[in-house]
Image (tube, rainbow, N blue to C red):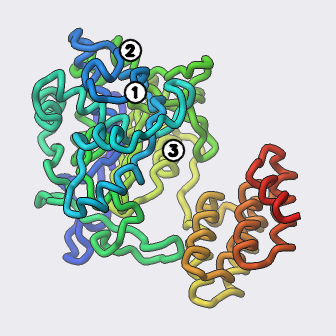
Amino acid sequence: MLISKSGEKTFSNFYGFSNIEKKEKINEKSQFPIASVSKTFTATAILQLKQQGKLKLDDPVQKYLPDFPYPNVTIRHLLSNTSGLAEYYHLFDNVIKEQPEKIISNGDIIPTLLQNNTPLSFSPGDKWEYNNLNFCLAALIVEKISGIAFRAYLEKNIFKPADMRDSFLPENRKLKKPNQVELYAYPNFYSTSLVNITNLKDPFLISEKSNFYGNGGIVSTALDLQKYQNALFKYQLLGKKELEEALTPAKLNNGKIASYRFEEKEIAYGLGWEMYTDESNGKIIFHDGSITGLTSILMHNIDKNQTVILLSNNAAPMFVLSNAISQLINNKPYVIPVQNLSRMYGSLLESGSEEKANQLIEEYLKNPKSYNASERDFNSLGYQFLRLQKNENALQTFAAATLIFPKSANIYDSYGEALLQCGKKEEAIKMYQKSVELNPDNENGKKVLKGLL
């Protein structure tokens, strides 16, 4: 982790192991994949070319990639995640099936879209939807205009000018450099012990079979990311006009800003950068990243010139940590991250300690600050138990979730689905009815109820 004020490093430290098995500790030279923080570099590369007059943001992607099948998608749509492109998680399933040894990369995207005749999910600019393909295609545009490989472009135009000596985009992300950290994750939503991700099977085939770049892939250090942030805000990588454009929330066709909600905050999306819409503590821009066993965040308060950089090889909760640190350095009340309630609860259920699991929920309801509880985590835990045919655990989890989130239509909908899957029709009907009562727009709930009544 690294914290800086006014461009100067005020605190930097490292904790834990780069390799647990070999007991090798993390140090300032330890290199981490930065995952989607890489998107800010791709946006910077595109904006550099725009600044040089080599492209316009509202140019159609087809102008540079003629085979691209969607004439109305522009470069701006790519960088603001408003293109309407299909997600990549299952896009390449047929390719993988037909060519199991093939490693899929950026050059395979357009041929696959054409082969599958894949439609857009929505009209460009109508909605905001996070999509890795957008930035993979942006990287292809950088290559087309510059005439060099994307990794060479980054090295020449961003890493070197910013003096980032420990950063690179690997040709093959499966091959690690000596200083690269090992990554660790929980094998499921109810385990409390980390394992090396080399021992885990990724739920998405494409993650195992791909080598995409532009959307992620860069390997770096906290110190190098501070150099990058400094170079950006001293206008050494981009002009003031281009940087401000990147940090302005994108507008949808209906005039609303492109945004989403997370951890009770509204987050707008610019061009490769995210920002909190609440600017009461200053204009805070950031990008976070997440892959199996890795989380990252680069957060910068423009008004106060404060930066928080966190890199974790065990998928620590970056939003909670970065917001706590931001509060701390501004002498404001902060919440120390606590244990994950759903993980502890699931662990107790799995070990057969149902009574202790119920006690845990009771303790939490009396003192909600004792654990971190999120609706999404409980939903994920319940569905995982269901997939593994641990039906009693699944039903217990959803029942507990209704106590913690009594106003969540989504939780009642999920509970109803689980009950139905377990053959408890009458109870399922009650849960779906409660869900629709809480959210009259729950069309799925209405449809299921119609079939049950």
Helix, strand or loop at label 2? It is loop
Residue 70's disc number = 1
Q: Nearer the viewer, residue 267 or 203?
A: 203
Which of discs 3 and 1 lies nearer the camera? The answer is 1
Tally of numbered discs: 3
What amino acid type should be assigned to the residue bearing mark 1? Tyr
Q: Indicate whether 113 appears above or below 33.
A: above
Q: Earlier in the sequence, mark 3 or mark 1?
A: 1
Helix, strand or loop at label 3? It is helix
What amino acid type should be assigned to the residue bearing mark 2? Asp
Residue 323's disc number = 3
What residue appears at the point 77 percent right and 65 percent down from the top-left corner? 402
Q: Indicate whether 103 appears above or below 152.
A: below
Which of discs 2 and 3 lies nearer the camera? The answer is 2
Q: Earlier in the sequence, mark 2 or mark 1?
A: 2
Task: Tell whether 98 sits left or right of 144.
Answer: right
Q: Residues within 10 Å of mark 3 (few under 14, many from 20)?
A: some
Expressed as whole percent of the image width and height from the top left, the position of residue 82 reads 48, 29
Disc 2: which residue: 58
